Image (tube, coloured by chain):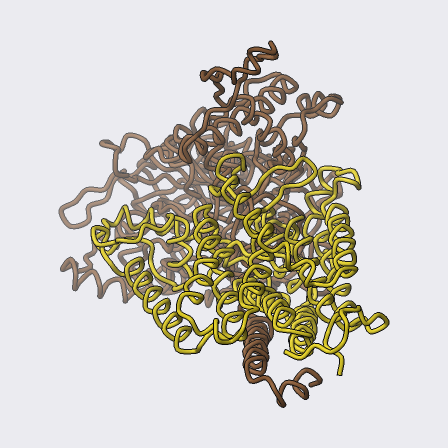
Chain colours: A brown, B yellow
Amino acid sequence: MIAFDHLKKNDPHLRMLGMAVLVGLLILLAGLWWVQIISHHRHTDSERNQSYRTVRIPAIRGKIFDRNGGVLAENRPSYDINLYLNELRPQFEEEFMRIRPRRAVTNPPPVWKRWLGIETPKVELVRLSRQQRDQLTAQAQYNVARRVVDEVGQVLGEEIPLTPEEFRRHYLQLRALPMPVRKNIDATQLARFLENTHLPQGVDLDVEPLRHYPQGRTAAHLVGHLVKDTRSQPGEVASVDYRMTDFRGNLGLEYVFDADLRGRAGVKSVLVNSAGYRISQNVWVADEPGRNVVLTIDLPLQRAAEEALASVGPDVRGAVVVMDARSGDLYALVSAPAYDPNAFVPGISSAEMAELNDPVMKPMRNRATQENYRPGSVFKIVTALACLQSGILNETNLHEPLPNPGFIMVGRRRIDDEAAAGEYTFERAFIKSSNTYFIHYGILAGFKAMQRAGMEFQFGQAMSLPTRQNTSGTFPDPAWIRSQRESAGLYWADGDTANLSMGQGFIDVTPLQIAVMIGAIANGGTLLQPRLVQRVESPRGAAEEIGTREFPPEIRGRLSFDPEHLALIRQVMRADVGNIHPGPNRGTGYKAEVPGMNICAKTGTAENKRPGESRVDKKDVWFASFAPLEDPKYVVIVMVENGVFGGETAAPVAKKIYQAIQKREQSGDFPTSRQFANR
Amino acid sequence: MPTASPKQPRLGTEEWLLIGATLCLLVIAALFIHSARYTTESAEDYPWFRQYYVKQIIFYLMGLTGAVLFNFLDYHSWARWSLVGYWGSIILLLLVPLIGFSAGGATRWINLGLFNLQPSELAKLAFIFMLAGFLSRPDGELRLVGNFWKALAMMALPFFLILKEPDLGSALIFIPVGLVMMFVGGIPKRYLFKLVGGVSVLVALVLVDVLFAPKSLQFIQLEEYQKHRLLTYFGMDFAPKDATPEERLKWEKIQRDKSYQSRQALIAVGSGGFHGKGWREGRQTSLKYLPPGAAHNDFIFSVIAEETGFIGSATCVALFGVVLFTGIRIAGQARDRLGKLLAVGVVTYIFSHVFINIGMNIRIMPVTGVPLPLLSYGGTSAIVSLIAIGVLHNVHLYRRAY
């Protein structure tokens, strides 16, 4: 270096100075190298961390359709009025200066000023401690926000609450996000807001999708409902600074298909300055909209079935299943009472929640699949099949009358018969639902035969409907017998067989299990898996291959009964409804008869003592049916809690449903199910 | 010292390396003062004549004019006024507490209407002249203890006045400048060693007292903020050892607030990386994480480092290196001891500022209010730095003939 050539020769002092300067500059360079090159990433991370906030944006939830494209669940825009705090900063400062305490200066001006007469009273700002300053700043910010919110309130024509605490909380925790002023304004308010050209600064209208169930209570149990959610789903950016309100399915299809419906949440990043205010934002990860779920349910039929069930009386509790006898497609699945899933969005009140938790009405329970009932006389179909299969009932004694004194003694117990005393052939016993007849032959056939027949229909097994509202019921299969023997010391006796023969005692079923049973009898022996969901499809429609998932019809099993025996059962079921034996000899289900439908059915009336009910003065009544006889297409199961008799309470409900089916068929747009079961 | 040639300026031999490096630094300064103030000024619609970089350019023009004028007259003639200059600046420093105005808890400026005069800056230059003149005496006299003490007193007077403002950083500058000038001037080394040793022991004691002693045993009462800066620099907890958990929380918050500047400056420099984020693209500046009150003056280097990266910051260091080594060469070629000491004084003055200021940006020095010469925004600093460069050049022009 030029500087040193000269210095070396004569001046050690300057040389030392030069060395010191050189070392100093090299230290600086090394320091800069260390900070800017070696630890660059660490500092870049710190910089990012302090200047970006990530916000999770939930994806738009998929829709739920019925089989014709009718909408069961969709999203409607929620118009929210938001306050962007960063735009209010100048006003915050102005307000702070305005409310800052001042005082007149007390010490007198200098002599010469007084002498010249240019004495002016001076006002100066009072010095504030840090704490006072913070308090005053918070006060000023709240004043400004309050003023803006009041102005918005005037535009909307309502008082909008905003407490200082609410404002403070948002300011301290979510400053980079807009502050919600009023969520979900109605159409009138929206119009008033949009008309107003002099909105205060910082106020803006944002649109957010909100879950909406246009059918209200219709099919509410199937659809389920949402609750607020704060968890991240797999495959998302897990750590975000802020989360927008998100919902997750809590029940029904919303719950089971949550992953499909929900899609994948996106993430946006907000650039904030040192005061924490929002400067700009951009999307980091785009959201993936949720997929749609298409059901087998036919909305007009579902509605008709609900109306039919409601016609029983106020506060009716019951269930209806309408199923395709050939494919297992569920056209309607009704449980009453229902609730409005819209009540859960955006949040549910505690009064509404208390109503939903009523211990007797239990509106949240899906009675078609989730509650246990005694099948009552409906189970005589199984008893009959057991007798036929074991040969106890056969060609020779089918038409042979059995005398019925109006009761039967089983051991020392007397069981009354609802059917009048008299002579009963098989058909008469079936359509009059004689306890004596079926207990007599049931005990003759033996418990083993009954057990085998019941297991053919897979009683005691859940139907695994994708709503997670399944219960398995009770059936005395060998495993159950074993466990009861071990736990309760139960030994099966003839009395138990007698009870089972008429669908009482140790048996519980769901209306859906009965639907599967009737379906198998109707279609000639195929136990169908009830199908509720046809497919999950991409939000762009069924044509889009990606993301589309089909759920084809499934078979649970095949009955090993003689087809002739099944045909016989179908015959007597028809006799129960059709006026083949008119007058006093007609069947119990005659009130369901619809001309042209050839309905086949078995009624049931079961004693069912539920917790909370002291007496069994009302009974659970059934109407288990299919139609038409010659080519069974539909299975209709009606179950009403606390009815009078199956034929009295449930049959008229079924009649209304069959009439609705007839109307649907005539309208021509009722899609026929894929033929699946072979007879 | 043999001086054969008459005191004529050796015109046509201007030191272009020095001038060039200086002008480069001035251009960089104007650019990045603009960048540092850009967010504020564009948001508040400053008229162009109120924008800081324009004001700074005016200060530069004033300073450059001063520096050029300074070169018309031999430095010996200027040095005759050193006594006036020194005592004048001392008077100004005495006036500061009376008529000066405060900002941020310190009284450092006198309002002159057009700009705020910072007498401590003037005092630095005046002190260099004063000491250079004082030390320009026969070697024999320099060996007298009395003269050593006199020189020391010359240094101590402005040092303590500035320390009282309080402005620890500016005050500290007097120590290396004084010591180096005495060393090069020929004050016997044993005196200097004793002085340096004594000062070191004293500083160590002060630090131990401030940092480790319990409250009752703290004899040296630093200003609270000075103490916090030292604690921050040494990475120590603010909270006293016997603090309750609530107190500790309170102290931790204060500590975060106090170390904020230093941390943000480091993040700014570090996130600049190798090539920086681009002019006016520095987020630390535009999002105001670097405090807007300091970004354009004490922390201008952070802005430069963030936006131009290692390339830019190393270039700045290199430009200062050119100025400093040219200065040392000028010292070596000076006609007499006065010229040599003036040059050495200016070099040390610039070097100390550069080292302390850049050092605090990368946390190898504690945060003190020391401006970066030629780069930081500020009228007095700009003008004084440029005149200091003018002094260097003057020594060069009237150098010894071979």
Is B235 left, or right, of A547 in this rendering?
left
Residue A669 picture quarter: top right
- Is residue A520 visible to the viewer in this orientation of the structure? no
Q: Residue at x 69, y 51 (%)?
A: A672
Residue B310 picture quarter: bottom right
Nearer the observer, B57 or B296: B57
Q: Is residue B76 above or below residue A381?
A: below
Nearer the observer, A10 or B324: A10
Q: Residue at x 57, y 42 (%)?
A: B109
Nearer the observer, A371 or B374: B374
Horizontal and vertical percent position of residue A355: 39, 30
Looking at the rendering, in which quadrant would you find the N terminus of chain B? bottom right
Q: Is residue A303 above or below residue B386?
A: above
Nearer the observer, B388 or A379: B388
Horizontal and vertical percent position of residue B312: 70, 69
- Is residue A531 visible to the viewer in this orientation of the structure? yes
The total of numbered circles placed on residues is 0
Horizontal and vertical percent position of residue A166: 46, 32
